[in-house]
């Protein structure tokens, strides 16, 4: 798995969407083959993955509400999702 660089602009893959599941009372990542239940931090990260913000900008945007979210963990999370084809990475 390759972790995204600070300049990459992650976005959800075309077949993937972030949604709130009322039955679970959690955010989920929906794909044709899976439903991934997210914690609040994961949902916040993916909510910022719009293809416009760089990884560095996403980490900076998380700081006010999530002071203890290290940039390395955000990179690992997005790298894992990119390797699974759920997030697209584009170098800015």
Image (spheres, rainbow, N blue to C red):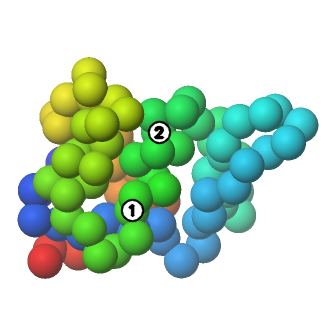
Q: Residues within 10 Å of mark 2 (few under 14, many from 20)?
A: some
Which numbered marker is on residue 63?
none
In the displayed structure, 15 sits above or below 63; it is below
**In the image, is 1 to the left or to the right of 83?**
left
Q: Residue at x 37, y 33 (%)?
A: 65
Residue placed under numbered mark 2 in the picture: 42
Name of the residue lying farthest toward the right:
23
- In the rendered image, residue 84, in percent from the top left (x then y), is placed at 44, 53
Q: Are marks 2 and 1 in contact (CB under 8 Å)?
A: no
Element assignment for label 1: loop
Residue 32 visible in the shown view: yes
Which comes sooner in the sequence, label 2 or label 1?
Answer: 2
x%, y% of residue 76?
26, 38
5 left or right of 15 in image: left
State the separation of the CA atoms marked 2 and 1.
11 Å
Q: Is residue 24 above or below residue 56?
A: above
> For mark 1, what is the residue?
49
Q: Residue at x 34, y 74 (%)?
A: 51
Q: Nearer the viewer, residue 82 or 10?
A: 10
Q: Quadrant of residue 38?
A: top right
- Can you give x and y, in whole percent of width and height, for residue 27 in the image? 66, 43
Say which quadrant the C terminus sits in: bottom left
């Amino acid at each position: 798995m390759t972790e995204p660089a600070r300049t990459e602009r992650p976005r959800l893959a075309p077949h993937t969407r972030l949604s709130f599941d009322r039955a679970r009372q959690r955010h989920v990542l929906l794909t044709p083959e899976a439903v991934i239940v997210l914690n609040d931090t994961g949902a916040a990260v993916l909510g910022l993955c719009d293809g416009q913000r760089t990884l560095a900008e996403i980490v900076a945007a998380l700081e006010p509400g999530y002071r203890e979210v290290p940039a390395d963990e955000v990179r690992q999370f997005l790298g894992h999702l990119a390797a699974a084809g759920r997030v697209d990475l584009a170098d800015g």
